[in-house]
Amino acid sequence: MRAYIEESSTPIYQRIAHSLGRYLASSGMDVFTVKPKGFNASSFQDFLSVQDGSSLYVSNGGASNIIQSRIPDRKEYFFEVFPGKLIFLHQDKILSGLNFVENILKIIAWKNIASRSFHLCIEPNDLVDLKSVGIFNAAIVPHATEIEPSDPCENFFDYNVSFVGHVVPSSYRSLFDEKRIQDFIDRALEIKCGDFAASLHDHVGYFSKSAAEILGDKEDREIIRIAYSQWLRTQLKNQSLQFRGWLLEHADIGRLTIFGGDPAYLHGVDRDIKIDRPGIFYSPATHDLQKTKEIFRQSRININITSLQFDHAVVNRFHDVTMSGGLCLTEPLPGLSELTSAYDDISFRTISDLEDRVKYFSRPENLRQRTALIKMLQKDINQNSGYPMILKFILSAIKSLG
């Protein structure tokens, strides 16, 4: 089988595309990398349309992949003119980053190609949403990392507690003019601040159901409900940096080094707002994977704060840190207990929980336990997630599509 996998301008999706491509090739497929910069809209459409029905296209970059864009001056998406099989490997919410109307249009387009496409999701709620609109070719997959396990550091650490990623002060919030939406966000933040592992599924469901009853005809109501709920999830995602800021502002965890911080530079904006709190220090973001791995390993404790659109998934930051030999503390979302039996040792539901975990693993007498725990987590990650498992799901999906 000839398989195409598209590169992405987003570094993490680029890593996934390259790693997944190698595993697809190892299964005997002829794998070709699609580089979007080599096409314009017309030439890309021509390239897709001349493929035969036995070929495969894998998209793992969501809306950042060109194949998931609409053809200029047409109602169709590029994936609709590809005659072969399509695998959508969703590494975020299935409609992350799109507006409400775009969500509706993409759901309809996915329905148009439902018989020759398959969706692999990291959130069970997305599976339910797809099936509710008549898209049944879907399954849940875990996240993965290509990083091989490294031995934990056992003596000298360069950093005490580290946070690698994007975060801004909690005061830097954009408010909605529509009071109903702002109330929705405020209540969601209230729920999450009380319990970092709390699901927002019911909260989102209530708002999306009521909106669908107002906006749509009966036959269109389910598509509108899903489109609206996915849009609400995107609004929650947009509050994640401020939520992380609130958590780090209030946690008494000693010296904390933030690698990255304000992501404005990614959008060409000259801004660098920082959390102003004693004990917090900043270091520039690194885009070199080897350097990032060393930060993870040389930090006594790494903190992951999951983006607010997720109720279940353990994101690949946790995998990357652990396989690099670092200790990662994160929220006890359901996916964590599915990944490892040691979930309780490394998770926190409240700021008090986080403070207790940091204090515990900062004590020299617990260093040996820390090392053993990391090695156990590495084995669990290899056993319960990873690219070999994702490959099995893809091969199964291809078989089911006939």
Image: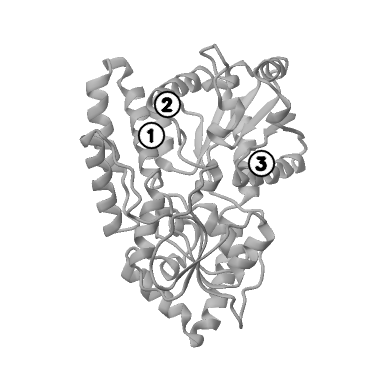
Badge 1 or badge 2: first in the primary sequence: 2
**What secondary structure is marked by label 1?**
helix
Amino acid type of the residue that numbered disc 1 sits on in the rendered structure: Gln
Q: Nearer the viewer, residue 293 or 271?
A: 271
Q: Which mark is residue 17?
A: 3
Q: CA distance from mark 1 to mark 3?
A: 24 Å
Image coordinates of residue 46 in percent, x first then y, are 70, 15
Please state, as top left, top right, bottom left or bottom right, where the N terminus lies in the image: top right
Q: How many marks?
A: 3
Question: On the image, numbered disc 2 is attached to which residue?
Answer: 103
Q: Quadrant of the C terminus?
A: top right
Q: Which residue is mark 1?
A: 230
292 over 31 or under it: above or below: below
At a point 39% along the width and 35% down the height, the residue shown is 128
Where in the figure is residue 213, as x and y percent of width and height?
Answer: 23, 23
Label 1 to label 2: alpha-carbon separation: 8 Å
Q: Is residue 70 left or right of residue 48?
A: left
The x, y position of residue 69, in whole percent, is 56, 24
Q: Is residue 375 above or below residue 91?
A: below
Amino acid marked by disc 2: Asn
Which residue is more in the foreground, 319 or 24? 319
Q: Is residue 379 visible?
A: no
Instruction: Sort mark 2 into few (<14), some (14-19) or many (20+) by Cα contacts within 10 Å.
Output: many
Q: Residue furthest bottom?
A: 365
Contact flag, marks 1 and 2 (Cβ < 8 Å) = yes
